[in-house]
Amino acid sequence: MAKVPATELDKLKKRLYRKEAELEALELRSRAIVDNLAIGVSVYDKKARLVVWNQQFLDLYRLRTEDIRRGTTFRRVLELRVTANTHVGADAGGYVADRMSAVGEARRLGGTHRLNTGEVIQMTHQPLDDGGWVSTHRDITEVYNLQAELTHLAYHDPLTALPNRTQFYQRLGQAFARLAANGGSFAVLCLDLDGFKPINDTLGHAVGDDLLRQFGRRITAQLGPNDIAARMGGDEFAILLGSGTVASAMELAERIRSSLERPFECLGEVASVGAGIGVAVAPDHGTDLDQLLHSADLALYAAKRERKGAIRMFETALDAAASGRRNIESALRQALENGELHLFFQPIVNLEARRFAGFEALLRWEHPELGNIPPSTFIPVAEESGLIVPIGEWVLREALNEAAGWPDYIKVAVNVSALQLRRGNLVATVCNALAASGVASNRLELELTESLFMEQSAQNLETMRQLRDLGVRFALDDFGTGFSALGYLLAFPFDKIKIDGSFVRALDDSPEARTIVSAVADIGHRLGMETTAEGIESAEQLRNVHAVGYAEAQGYLISRPMSREAVRRLLDGAFDRMTDEPMAAALLTDDDIALQAAS
């Protein structure tokens, strides 16, 4: 074999040294990138030997640096995790065997696991072409626990810890599914406290809240393992008797009435309340959720009219009592045409800028004979009848036309119902109303409630995305009272979360409410969404929500809803014509924020 000349050999050596230096530099750069990732990374070769890892990986599983080196087998890594108790489950041997079997699958894997030490890890497993694999490990404990807290909030009443309306509806739906499959019967009881309001007003909200908690415990004590009691809102409760007959349902109602004969001791005060109870049994009194609840509500209404503490079973004749709602519907059909509907506006203030951020448009109905009909009476009728679609279009046009005369920095908020999204041409309606008014799209804020996502969410989200592309803002209203979950907050980028006023009102006396109010503010901050506290009735509540980070506030402390003319006078008085600068700050002092005089 011919000898390589010395000069050529030197050249080859130099080239080799350069390549080695380049490779070493590349490895150092790669190592620096891996070490600076916010997640743990581990890479194994085709023989299941560790070749690349970072400190985050070691920290997540509490592995010692001296125990891990290049070539450490996957089995050995698992055994070290067992020693550190950062594996999953009580069966360590079974866990190691299961993981060894899983890596043999040449496909992408992933999942979320809670380690024995409590951390929740999100892991991915990606096979490589050479037979090895790369895995990533992310600590999502904080987010996971926050979602668990919100999930609990979504299905439970924060005051009484009972199931809320959402969970009750789900359980009721499941009962109907069992009924269709297996036959039988079950019952629903609707309860409304007698005498609660005077106690709440005279003895204070703290006593009233404690009374509601104790009432929930008393009725729950009368239930069997397949029954649930839920707080539906205010002093209204409902019970699902999982296998109830007419006889067993009435027997339960009597036991509940007897349990209420003993006075309640609430924070040093003695209070006595009863409860009207309406009873309906499926399938005799309803073959679906809405019909059965309607029957129970009619029975409750009859019980409340009869006397305090009365119990009524649904009967067909009670349907006649619902004729008043049909009369409302008939009158409502003429109200828009006859000019009986009006808009009032409630201010929303920016707590940092200390000025008005906008006004929420609220619908009012003044009947020529019946006088002012409350929204709680006619809005449900409008939604049930479909009239909410044309009425909603009118509200949108009128609100934008009014906002056209306001300063450009002030937004207008309009409530949108699920029916408007489902049956109305909302995108075209909004476009036409914006064009006719000349109001910039980013000044319009559509408020949606959580119940909107209970059905046809994909269709609703698509409509919302189209409107968002136009520049329209969205607020999630009454957050915490319905189908709360991070899922739809992440599915659609809301601009604002409005926490329900019931949480704000509970701030003074409920540590749980304070936790929830603070958590919602934190969620909004993390997701880049503004937060508004509704139902502000005292200066202390205002200071509390401001302290935990709420950007905006709305409620009777600031102002009751006001007429268009009152809004114009208010804005004229809050605007310095010499400097053209907003002067609402003068109304937002450090003592109290109060605009009641403008209402």
Image (cartoon, grey):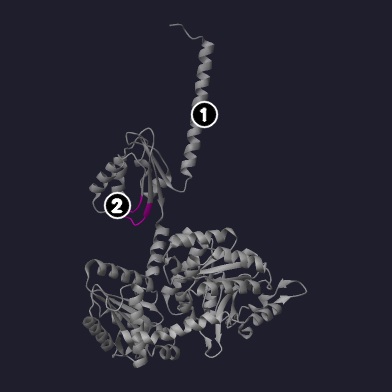
Rendered location of residue 295, percent (x, y): 33, 80
Q: Amino acid at mark 2?
A: Val
Q: Nearer the viewer, residue 270 or 453?
A: 453
Q: Amino acid at mark 1?
A: Glu
* Image quarter of residue 269: bottom left
* Image quarter of residue 275: bottom left
Q: Nearer the viewer, residue 341 or 263?
A: 341
- Secondary structure of residue under mark 1: helix
Q: Which mark is residue 22?
A: 1
Dot placed on the residue nearer the N-terminal end, 1 or 2: 1
Rendered location of residue 147, percent (x, y): 41, 62
Magenta residue span: 111-121
Question: Which residue is painted at 76% across and 72% down in the image?
Answer: 579
Q: Nearer the viewer, residue 174 or 339?
A: 339
- Secondary structure of residue under mark 2: loop
Q: Which mark is residue 385?
A: none
Q: CA distance from mark 1 to mark 2?
A: 42 Å
Q: Nearer the viewer, residue 229 or 400?
A: 400
- In the visual, does 517 lie left or right of 354? left
Crowding around mark 2 (Cα neighbors within 10 Å: few <14, some 14 to 19, many 20+) is some
* Circle 2 residue: 88
Residue at the right extreme of this rendering: 578
> Was residue 434 drawn as part of the magenta stretch in this picture?
no
